[in-house]
Amino acid sequence: NLAGISPGPGEPSQTVAISAQSSNPDLVVNPVVNYVSPDSSGALALMFNPGTNGLAIVTVTANDGTVTFARAFNVTVRARPTLSLIPDIMIDEDTTSPAISFQASDVETPVSNLLFVVSSSNPTVVPPANVSIGGLGTNRTLTVIGAANEFGHSVLTLTVSDTDGLARSNSLVVIINP
């Protein structure tokens, strides 16, 4: 939010114009300013280009026709990890699925430092502990073993997190036949 906007002292009839510019519009698109003079506040909307990361300097400028005043601030954009889609699978009760390939990566975090967590909508049929993640680098595998003597279905959600705490999740359906 923008606050404390006013024309110069003793000049209440001056119109104040507010603008904003990004030093890196490929990362942070030039901000949208929502301000109507003579309001004392306004808003600044920041938008980021998907799949980008880095630093941009945003400069906000106020001009009352006589005086120009500018302030700048840094905007750091961190990218979430990438995670490919994982196909749904069907296996028989008390068997192990084949290794299912998927890819995961991150532009800021080495792939060896990515954290994988699995949750299950039906842990009676597929406990999260029965899902293993293998592979090296960006090429990974997921293997599922249903709970002993159980059949049914479960939605597994695989979440990958980077060292900045950003995450991406994808889900797959696992059907265990009797």
Image: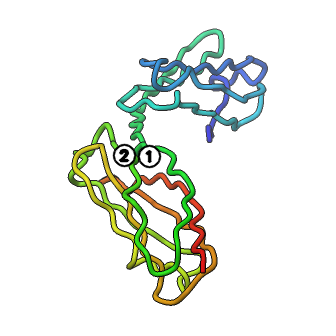
* Viewer-proximal residue among 167 and 34: 167
* Viewer-proximal residue among 85 and 41: 85
Residue 44 location, quadrant? top right
Q: Position of residue 175 (x, y in %)?
A: 60, 69
- Determine which of the numbered discs, if any, sits on residue 104 in the image: 2
* Viewer-proximal residue among 75 and 99: 99
Residue at numbered disc 1: 83
Amino acid, disc 2? Ala
- Name the residue at 64% across, 21% down: 18
Of callouts 2 and 1, which one flags the residue occurring earlier in the amino acid sequence? 1
Quick check: 107 left or right of 118? left
- Determine which of the numbered discs, if any, sits on residue 118 in the image: none
- Name the residue at 43% across, 29% down: 52
Assess disc 2: are there few (<14), some (14-19) or many (≥20) residues with their C-alpha within 10 Å of its C-alpha.
many
- Name the residue at 41% across, 54% down: 100
Q: Position of residue 41 (x, y in %)?
A: 69, 38
Q: Are marks 2 and 1 in contact (CB under 8 Å)?
A: yes
* Viewer-proximal residue among 74 and 121: 121
**Helix, strand or loop for disc 1:** strand
Amino acid, disc 1? Leu
Q: CA distance from mark 2 to mark 1?
A: 5 Å
On the rendered image, what quadrant is the C terminus found in? Answer: bottom right
- Name the residue at 71% across, 36% down: 40
Quick check: 106 left or right of 86? left
